């Protein structure tokens, strides 16, 4: 299975969707519901997946995150996001 | 239980809704209790919808619709809409029998998120033999219809001694149905499957071959079809974390509204179960003596009590312990450390002895086999 390419448009896989926002915790937290489970997302993971809307390209998502985390190494940000999306595709939560 | 202990309980995550025990299939490994809920005791649509509302407020995320066959309820669309409105992810576990395009469309429009179809085999004759019904061809047709809709699709395949020898063929069969996910589950020996265990346990050689085939398929299908597989715990070194721990994650509601910590809990003597007609889900979750009975570690015997794996597998399955040892508090006998493990070793010895192993059965001879061994197994019956 290949990692996403710059022109890939990551999106939630068929039958996966956002659940209600958890308002009982201080930090912003959302869940993605999928067939046999749920993924609780905060912070970076949440920022990435909220951008996986099937419109933005992988390159755009990386650029936006690199802008937000300007102190971190851009190459590392790219590698982390790529790996994260690849893992989620493996679980059939994300497609690209 | 005192207040501080009550606060330790996290909320349940999923509701298993057995909306009816009626079923057009008669599978020999059905997990339903031998004593099925009567048709006239089933909860009404309004009662179910109220249960879903309560489940959503309790923080549950998923509603798994199962049975029996959920489609046997004419009001299923209304129930799915009710669960979705309560904020739950809706999963329909079905044989697909009786599901035509119009009804499928209505279910999807009502908010169905995921549909899971069980296949009994890749070969029509064998599949119908195991199901005790002619359903195979319809399921294939239904799978094609499902792919026209934007919902998640899982194909579930139960494997056992009678079909495991052509697992690769079954995986290829599922692959062309193009689901997001396939579940390859060895039959678990409860209910009807325990009754039919001798005909269902695979041999060690069969199992090892199956594990290899699944591993290769996972690699080949990565990124396209996710494979979740369940191994037969009789061959495992340690028990499965049954239900993710007793009273930790799941609530199961029977057609009549009775609330259980798991599918098979009724086999355990001395447990009393509440009904959603009389109590709220929250009070049952927090206070029910049956949910508290094996929650946490207080009930554990040795070697579980001091075992470093106790927070991983929770001592295994209480129902299996009861069914095989007569004691619900025993360590699950499938555990290699369990005092009662010789029970499992004896069952496996019998399975793997040369006398017990019948040669591989070819597709064409299944029907003959069925005739020859009329008492091979008992088909699941239907409720009154």
Image (spheres, coloured by chain):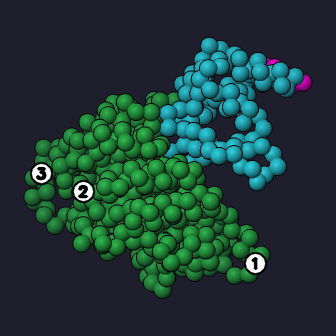
Chain colours: A cyan, B green
Q: Nearer the viewer, mark 3 or mark 1?
A: 1
Callouts 1 and 2 close, C-beta under 8 Å:
no
Visible residue check, residue B193: no
Main SS of the magenta part reads: loop
- Between label 2 and label 3, give the one nearer the viewer: 2
Identify the image quadrant of the C terminus of chain A. Answer: top right
Residue drawn at x 43%, y 76% as measured from the top left = B266
Which residue in the structure is indicated by mark 3? B367
Residue B367 image offset from top left, x and y in percent? 12, 51
Q: Earlier in the sequence, mark 2 or mark 3?
A: 2
Q: How many marks?
A: 3
Q: Which residue is mark 2?
A: B25
Please determine whether, in this image, residue A31 is positioned above or below residue A58. Answer: below
- Residue B27 lies left or right of residue B334; in this view the side is left
Residues drawn in magenta: A71-75
Magenta segment includes A13: no
- Which residue corresponds to the image point at 44% horizontal and 63% vertical from the top-left? B46
On what subunit does the disc labeled 1 rest? B
Residue pictured at 18% horizontal, 49% vertical: B134
Crowd class of label 3 (few under 14; some 14 to 19; many from 20; radius 10 Å): some
């Amino acid at each position: 299975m290949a990692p996403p390419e710059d022109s890939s448009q990551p999106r939630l896989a068929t039958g996966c969707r956002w659940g209600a926002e958890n308002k009982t915790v201080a930090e912003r937290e959302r869940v993605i519901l999928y067939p046999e489970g749920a993924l609780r997302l905060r912070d970076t993971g949440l920022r990435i997946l909220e951008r996986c809307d099937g419109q933005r390209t992988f390159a755009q998502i990386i650029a936006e995150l690199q802008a937000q985390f300007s102190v971190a190494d851009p190459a590392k940000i790219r590698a982390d996001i790529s790996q994260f999306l690849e893992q989620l595709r493996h679980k059939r939560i994300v497609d690209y | 239980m005192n207040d501080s202990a009550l606060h330790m309980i996290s909320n349940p995550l999923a509701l298993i809704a057995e909306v009816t025990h009626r079923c057009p299939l008669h599978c020999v490994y059905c997990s339903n209790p031998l004593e099925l809920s009567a048709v006239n005791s089933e909860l009404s649509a309004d009662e179910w919808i109220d249960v879903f509302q309560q489940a959503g407020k309790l923080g549950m995320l998923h509603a798994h619709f199962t049975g029996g066959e959920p489609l046997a309820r004419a009001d299923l669309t209304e129930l799915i809409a009710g669960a979705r409105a309560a904020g739950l992810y809706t999963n329909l576990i079905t044989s697909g029998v009786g599901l035509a395009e119009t009804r499928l469309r209505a279910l999807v429009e009502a908010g169905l998120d995921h549909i899971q179809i069980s296949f009994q085999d890749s070969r029509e004759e064998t599949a119908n033999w195991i199901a005790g019904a002619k359903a195979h061809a319809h399921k294939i047709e239904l799978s094609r219809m499902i792919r026209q809709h934007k919902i998640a699709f899982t194909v579930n395949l139960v494997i056992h001694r009678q079909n495991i020898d052509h697992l690769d063929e079954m995986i290829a069969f599922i692959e062309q149905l193009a689901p997001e996910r396939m579940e390859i589950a060895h039959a678990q020996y409860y209910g009807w499957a325990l009754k039919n265990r001798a005909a269902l346990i695979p041999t060690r050689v069969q199992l090892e071959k199956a594990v290899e085939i699944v591993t290769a398929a996972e690699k080949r299908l990565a990124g396209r079809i996710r494979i979740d597989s369940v191994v037969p715990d009789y061959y495992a070194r340690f028990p499965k974390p049954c239900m993710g721990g007793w009273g930790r994650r799941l609530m199961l509601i029977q057609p009549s509204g009775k609330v259980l910590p798991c599918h098979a809990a009724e086999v355990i003597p001395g447990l009393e179960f509440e009904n959603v007609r009389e109590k709220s889900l929250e009070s049952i979750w927090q206070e029910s003596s049956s949910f508290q009975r094996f929650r946490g570690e207080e009930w554990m015997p040795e070697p579980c009590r001091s075992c470093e794996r106790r927070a991983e597998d929770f001592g295994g399955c209480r129902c299996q312990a009861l069914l095989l040892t007569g004691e619900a508090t025993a360590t699950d006998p499938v555990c290699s450390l369990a005092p009662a493990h010789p029970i499992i070793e004896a069952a496996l010895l019998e399975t793997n002895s040369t006398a017990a192993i019948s040669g591989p059965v070819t597709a064409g001879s299944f029907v003959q086999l069925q005739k020859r061994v009329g008492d091979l197994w008992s088909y699941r019956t239907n409720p009154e």
